[in-house]
Image (cartoon, grey):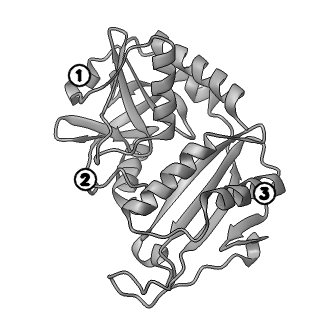
Amino acid sequence: MNTVFVNGELVGRDKAKIDIEDRGYQFGDGIYEVIRVYDGKTFTMKEHMERLYQSAEKMKLSIPYGEEEFTTKLMELIELNGVKDGIVYLQVTRGVSPRQHHFPAKGVRGSVVAYTKDYPVPTHQMEQGVTAKLVEDIRWLRCDIKSLNLLGNLLAKEEAASEGHFEAILHRGDTVTEGSSSNAFMIKNGVIYTHPVTNLILNGITRRVIEDLCRKNEISFQEKIFSVSELMEADEAFIASTTSEVMPVVEIDGQVIGDGKPGTVTKRLQALFSERKGNEAS
């Protein structure tokens, strides 16, 4: 896995260079996506690419390649690196210009990079469940944009990880929003609840797959705000992301959720998700 994509070229990783005045480096002025690869095939590639371009539009950022051309380059990168089970990371910034807070001249071309990485499915954790820590959500108010500005996420994740937890579950006051790198869900009386799609969360691609699976398999799914206390009293809880898939949360802040094991609804979703990725990875 030594080939990377840098501004239109596929080059060796040792030759990949980014200018020190790239706005992604200096301001976090850019966007990114992480796309799953299963058995050499991408999963939900189209949805990820669509979200990338939507984030770009919200940031008034111009991606220098069309979606089809960019997708073709990424597929070539995956093939060149022989990725089996892994990810492809892609990032677009507003480009290179002398440091100034306002946007550079319109002629400045955005910087685009992508690379691949092995990333096995976390099977053991998915079977056993993980623990989480509640952390106040201090992020900005445009979490719907998948931007490089992740300091709030990083601080929360580090707080959780330093205490041995897999994830930080964020809340604004008493309202649960999402995980530091995932969407958050609770289950009560067989009903799945998750925060509505607003500017306060990222509308995760895995989240969308879960919603679709629920609709097609008669599992009650509600986009509804829920509180920290409701989460702690849930029958089951789980988080979801590209890399974690459907990940059971069996303990939060030292309090056992349900019976402390992955619940029946969560396990059913895991099975449905596994079937979907097997059928749709392409």
**Callout 2: few (<14), some (14-19), or many (20+) C-alpha neighbours within 10 Å?**
some
- In front: mark 2 or mark 3? 3
Residue beneath the point at 28% across and 54% down: 139
Tell me the residue that label 2 is attached to. 138
Percent across and percent down for residue 10 are: 76, 69
Percent across and percent down for residue 189 are: 32, 8
Residue type at the position of mark 1: Glu
Residue type at the position of mark 2: Ile
Q: Secondary structure at mark 2?
A: loop
Tell me the residue that label 3 is attached to. 76
**Callout 3: few (<14), some (14-19), or many (20+) C-alpha neighbours within 10 Å?**
some
Residue type at the position of mark 3: Glu
Tell me the residue that label 1 is attached to. 230
Task: In this rendered view, identify the residue nearer to me: 226 or 54.
Answer: 54
Name the N-terminal-most of marks 2 and 1: 2
Q: Quadrant of the N terminus?
A: bottom right
- In front: mark 3 or mark 1? 3
Q: Quadrant of the C terminus?
A: top right
Q: In the image, is residue 123 above or below residue 242?
A: above
Percent across and percent down for residue 251 are: 38, 25
Residue beneath the point at 60% across and 79% down: 18
Residue 263 seen from this side: no
How far apart are the alpha carbons under marks 2 and 3?
Answer: 39 Å
